[in-house]
Amino acid sequence: MINLFDHYNQLTKDLHQSLTLAGYTHPTVVIDDNGFLPEGIHSPYMYFLGQENKQAKALYFNQVKTPKFWEIKGTNTSGEIYCYDEKRANIFYAEPTHKRLVRTVEWLDKANIVRCVDYYNQYGRQYARTTYNTKQEPIVTTYYHVNGTEVIVENHKTGNILLSYREKIYTFKSKIEFIRFYLNEAGFDCECVIYNTLALSFLVLYGLQTLKKGVLFWQEPIHDSIPGNMQTMFNDNREFKVAVPDRSVYEKMQPLLTDAQKTKVSLSGYIYTYKRDNHYQPNALVLTNSDQVEHLEDFIQELPHITFHVAALTEMSNRLTNLSKYTNVRLYQNVTMRIVDKLFQNCDVYLDINHANEILYATRRAFDYQLLLFSFTNTKHSHFVSPDNNYPSEQWKNMSQKLSDVFSNRQLFDTLLEKQKYAAHQVGVQSYHQLLR
């Protein structure tokens, strides 16, 4: 058995963690390797590139090699390379971006058009380069062995992939063929495959001669009909199942399925582990890099018995620093990760009320620490906020009243925490055992 995933995003991480917590520790293969996959995750590209120096570290943004006298500038979100006043490259960071660790560098021509992109991994090595034409269309991606030689050349126009491996040159007509070759060469047991998309990973496994059973965890929305590849899967004589973690998606699918198909589709969910129990103390946390924090000052004034902890990775504007005049406010500018960890340990409510981007995966982290989450509909950053605690901005007084109530009524607090977990589709280990037996 293996897991075969196209990408390792947050939903994939949640699925992978759930499988692991349920006792399914078989190998995980991720097709799209961004160079920063967790330890123990397999990748078809990295398999052929040799053993990395695990003692090496990721490249810091100002360590990118440039010609003499060129200047590298950086913020907590991205970097740029200049030749005097002319921008020559964009630097993109791996998550979390505030660490400024280089993931890709886009090199620009004189017309400010991207002509090539260099890819770096978590060990600071440039492992690939993609070249582009003047229309900014990718032409060729070349992957480099740890010894510097070209190992894989992927032609984006034809779809062909060339592999130099064990003193032979292999030619594959598509990425699908290449990945199937890798799975066989790496010796994975592919009788049963767990996957979470009907895109590349499904196309790879569907043609595997050894496949006997496939389990699709459908983590996407459903529209007005069952996707074509899912219909194909249902019509196959091999054993295919579909697990749907999102309750609303599962319910929407039901009228679209035949009776026979319904027997192959199950409601699933996710298994979570929590960092600590809630302390029920009147400490509310906000993480923001914006001074646009919806109704924050109103809450501060309305709820003097609650201490509001507001933290930012950067310096704060006067709009936020002026809040220090209130005795129930604590501000943390240029906050360190040690302080952030402490804030999640000590606070028991998280307010997802800042505009602009979320920082440090704040709502997910708050969920993991069992903080009770609240948000406005126009500031909500993730699905971890229960619908019960998500308010239109004009109903801020209703939210304020509930914030006051939860700290005087522990039973209400516990009820809302359970609703929060229900909204995040929490299930137990037994649910996975029944599904995968």
Image: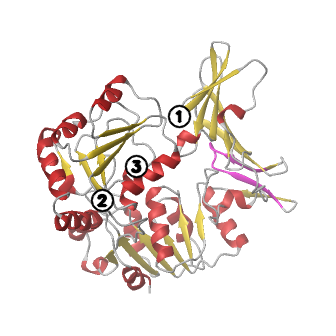
Q: Secondary structure at mark 3?
A: helix
Mark 2 and mark 3: span between their CA atoms? 27 Å
Q: Secondary structure at mark 1?
A: loop
Q: Nearer the viewer, residue 278 or 162?
A: 278
Identity, as a three-letter code, of the amino acid under mark 3: Ala
The answer to which image quadrant residue 208 occupies is bottom right
Find out whether the residues at labels 2 and 1 contact each other: C-beta distance under 8 Å.
Answer: no
Q: Which residue is mark 1?
A: 76
In the image, residue 281 sits, relative to residue 20, either above or below, namely above
Q: Is residue 148 left or right of residue 395?
A: right
Specify whether residue 365 is in view: no
Q: Which residue is mark 3?
A: 362
**Sequence-first tag of 3 and 1:** 1
Q: Which residue is mark 2?
A: 222
In the image, residue 324 sits, relative to residue 425, either above or below, namely above
Mark 2 and mark 1: span between their CA atoms? 36 Å
> Residue 305, position in %: x, y?
21, 47
Mark 3 and mark 1: span between their CA atoms? 16 Å
